[in-house]
Amino acid sequence: MDCSLTEARKPPAALAKFFDDPPLLPSESREEYERLFSAIVDAGEPADAIAWLFTRDIADLTWEIRRERAVKAQVIASARHAVVKEKLTPIDKSMLAHHAPPGTSLATLTGDRTDLEKWQNDPKSRPAIEKKLANRGHDGPSILAEAFIQAAASIDAIDRRIASYELRRMAALREAAAYSARLAGQLKASSEAVIEGEFIEVAQ
């Protein structure tokens, strides 16, 4: 484990090889994982080798769940951005002339290239541009709903992975409870606090 951890947070030396390969992707921070691990260790207070192994299992599964939730939030955010971009992308007026309902204002439907460029490149301009979209009938909830529809397959796949990790976490907690009810209760509470505390809400 990281040398910045206190001795009280380090597993027994005999178990070191089981703790030196956290489930990190290349882009993920070892330091961030160590902070998560330390938080769960502090709550669980593992007193022997078996308790340490349960703690490691719960920490790793908590990390995986947190990652999937973050990815889900990013998928939704990316889909939302794609929907907004689509609404702002100028449409060929000659095509609209043939397909728009009678009386439709071309100025309302064709979008504005300047707005699109500002929305993409100037965060300060986004609220005003999104207000324009709302005035055209594309408010925040409707855009988010369309984003969910577009990203449905990816969201469903992530939800299945989260459910799988949750089942594994609960199974590990049941096994821990058979060994020590105190340990399992503390690991359950601390891992849930980390998962909920690290969840990233999608911006409206």
Image: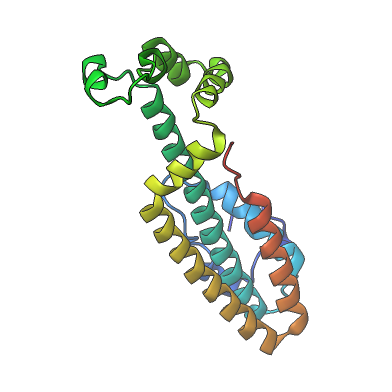
Q: Which image quarter holds the N terminus? A: bottom right
Name the one closer to the observer, 65 or 25.
65
157 vs 121: above or below? below
Res. 4 in view: no
**Residue depicted at 51% across the width and 62% down the height:** 20
Q: Which image quarter holds the C terminus? A: top right
> Which residue is the extreme one toward the top?
114
> Which residue is the extreme one toward the front?
102
Q: Quadrant of residue 155?
A: bottom left
**Residue depicted at 33% across the width and 26% down the height:** 101
Res. 7 in view: yes
Q: Quadrant of residue 156?
A: bottom left
Name the one closer to the observer, 131 or 55.
131
Give the image location of residue 146, x and y in percent: 44, 42
Count the marks.
0
Type of colouring: rainbow
Give the image location of residue 48, x and y in percent: 69, 79
**Residue depicted at 57% across the width and 74% down the height:** 14
72 vs 129: above or below? below
Judge from the rendering whether residue 186 lies leftward or rightward of residue 202; answer left or right: right
> Which residue is the extreme one toward the bottom?
178
Name the one closer to the observer, 62 or 147.
147
37 vs 163: above or below? above
Give the image location of residue 45, x and y in percent: 75, 70
**Residue depicted at 40% across the width and 22% down the height:** 88
Give the image location of residue 32, x and y in percent: 59, 48
